Amino acid sequence: MTRFLIRRAAGFVLTLLAVSVVVFAVMSMLPGDPALSILGIEASPEALAAMRSQLGLDAPAPARYAAWALGALKGDFGTSYAFRVPVGGLIAERLPLTLSLALGAMAVTLVLAPGLGMAAAARHGGPGDWAVMVLSQIGIAVPAFWMSILLILLFAVRLGWLPSGGFPGWDQPLAALRALVLPVIALALVQSAVLARVTRSAALEVMRLDFVRTARATGLPRRRILWRHVLPNALIPIVTIIGMQFAAIVTGTVVIESVFSLPGLGRLLLQSIANRDLITVQALVLLFAAIVVTANFLVDLAYVAIDPRLTGRQS
Amino acid sequence: MIRVEGLSAALPQGQALRDVSLSVARGERLGLVGESGSGKSMLGLALMGMVPDAAQLSGRIALDGQDMTGATEAAWQPLRARKVAMIFQEPMTALDPLVRIGETVMEPLILHLKMRRRDARARALDLLAETGLTEPEAKMRQYPHQLSGGQRQRVLIALALACDPGVLIADEPTTALDAQIALRITDLLVRLSRDRGMALIFISHDLAAVARATERLAVMYGGDLVETGATAEVLANPRHPYTQGLIAARPRPDPAMIRKRLPVIPGTVPTLGDLPRGCRFAGRCAAELPRCAGTRPAPWPTASGQAACHLLEPAP
Ligand SMILES: Nc1ncnc2c1ncn2[C@@H]1O[C@H](COP(=O)(O)OP(=O)(O)O)[C@@H](O)[C@H]1O
Ligand SMILES: [Mg+2]
């Protein structure tokens, strides 16, 4: 048990390390001279050289990587070429918004999908099952940005219940929450559709197994069999998909923040790419990757909590 | 305890049970034999109200005086485990892999008998000990994958006994186990049935096990009950050609016999759709008469029961 956890934790750290190397390498290989983009094309070669050494760009790649990675560990991602402020600060300002979007969408998905999927599986072949299948098929087929536009047209433009975009800032909590409702729903609907289907098929798979027949022969009520025996056994595929979905949601915020003009990390990423602000892009890509790797690590931990067979856990 | 009259189970492909009438008295041990596909499991499931959705039942089923003909799932559910319980062939997959053994056995005690957890735990321990599980206390905390097949079958028996049912249906409980464990499980079922005055329906295709475990025997073929009677009597003096074939085809421990070719019943069990309209055994029967394939034989009395065969018809 503890050995399994240590192995997984070591894997987690190594993956993060590998990700940081890859991100750094890819960013270093991109064409373009940061000094040039900061000083402009009229700058003299001497000024450019001075700027490069000021940015630490004249050091060999391994040394530059080490400096960057050590800084990142302390939350110091360098200074943005475009905004001339610390990248860490830029990220810290925007992280709460993006995290609220992602966690909110994940929470809505977790509230909606498993119940729908289990209800569909329990009514396999019946009208309830059909309804869930048709709705989820629609949810999967409609792209998130399109869903966003539909939501804006209906709830903002037509009904006027919620703002169509923009963010008032956290100092107005109610208005801030209202601004998040539509983007969270737009992100969550697609993922709920996917997860409801996965839950349904995983549950149907489990319902054919022998121990479900044993539970029935023991006179257990249907609902108890579903929630106490079928759902836990269906959790392994469900949790796997949830991990992948969290990654999809985090990357999905990039599009959603643009559609709803929300000042989050996704928007910062697009701006930095447009500005050729490589050092900020590099930090953001690392951060997104770290979030995804962390989600996968949590999924690994969840497996252990769910299934005693995985670790040979004794009593 | 159990009374079945004219029970049929129609599947889209054909009849899995045809006009089966059978009764099991309180505390009686009945063996149910027949080749694979004869409808033994279907009959067992019918007595639990658990036939597949595709099967249309007709005929009467009464359990402990209660008429269960056409009963709904909701009507069956309270009887399962409390009046009639069932264990199945494959113990390896019959337990929820995520639930500890103790919790599994405690579940019906808490749910059906409204026991408090502490009492349920003590009772579960007693039940596991009663089935001869070694170190039951430690096993309570273990998961199914930590137990062997024989141990799991004991756990499933304890689970089936939890609410003290009047009848236990054991559907080939030893087929998946090796010979020595199989023998012990068979003897365990007999002992439990005696100790508790519990009726036992022992489904098997192992005639030796049935001879050892049961008092009365019912032979099934193609969804028909072809012969019934006292176990010893039927095995010593089978009247139906199918029963005679089964007994002749049984594997013998005698090494001299193994080297010779074992006599087997010629042909294979037809699929449901291809069963003859009359006697189901027509087409494979060595003593077949012209009318056998078209006319269903009536059950005729034998020394200790009945056999449904045209050969037994009294001369006019
Ligand atoms: N769920 C099902 N769907 C279709 N046919 C079935 C089903 N269950 C059993 N049968 C058929 O019913 C017949 C009797 O099967 P069964 O009762 O399992 O036989 P036994 O237990 O004697 O081996 C077989 O022909 C089998 O193919
Ligand atoms: Mg069977």
Image (cartoon, grey):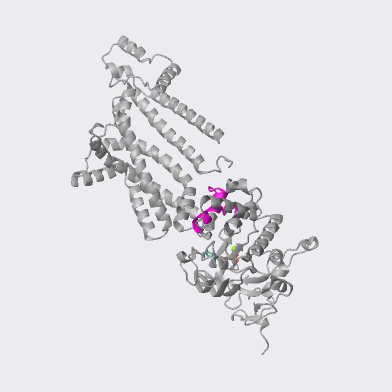
The residue at the far top in this view is: A46
The residue at the far right in this view is: B256
Which quadrant of the structure image shows residue B181?
Answer: bottom right
Q: Nearer the viewer, residue B235 or B125?
A: B125
* Residue B310 falls within the magenta-colored stretch: no
Q: Is residue A191 visible?
A: no
Residue B12 in the image: above or below residue B151:
below
In the rendered view, does B300 fall on the left or right side of A132? right
Which quadrant of the structure image shows residue A77?
Answer: top left
Q: Is residue A156 visible?
A: yes
Quadrant of the snapshot with the N terminus of chain A: top right
Residue A108 drawn at (x, y percent): 34, 44
Q: Residue at x 68, y 76 (%)?
A: B240
Residue stretch in magenta:
B91-112
Q: Residue at x 50, y 68 (%)?
A: B55
Q: Nearer the viewer, residue A68 or B23?
A: B23
Q: Nearer the viewer, residue B34 or A150?
A: B34
Q: Quadrant of ligand 2?
A: bottom right
Residue B200 drawn at (x, y percent): 62, 66
Quadrant of the snapshot with the C terminus of chain A: top right
Which quadrant of the structure image shows residue B267?
Answer: bottom right
Residue B134 drawn at (x, y percent): 66, 49
Residue B2 in the image: above or below residue B104:
below
Kindly report the secondary structure that dominates the magenta region of the rendered protein. helix
In the rendered view, does A89 fall on the left or right side of B218? left
Q: Nearer the viewer, residue A255 or A71?
A: A71
Residue A189 drawn at (x, y percent): 33, 46
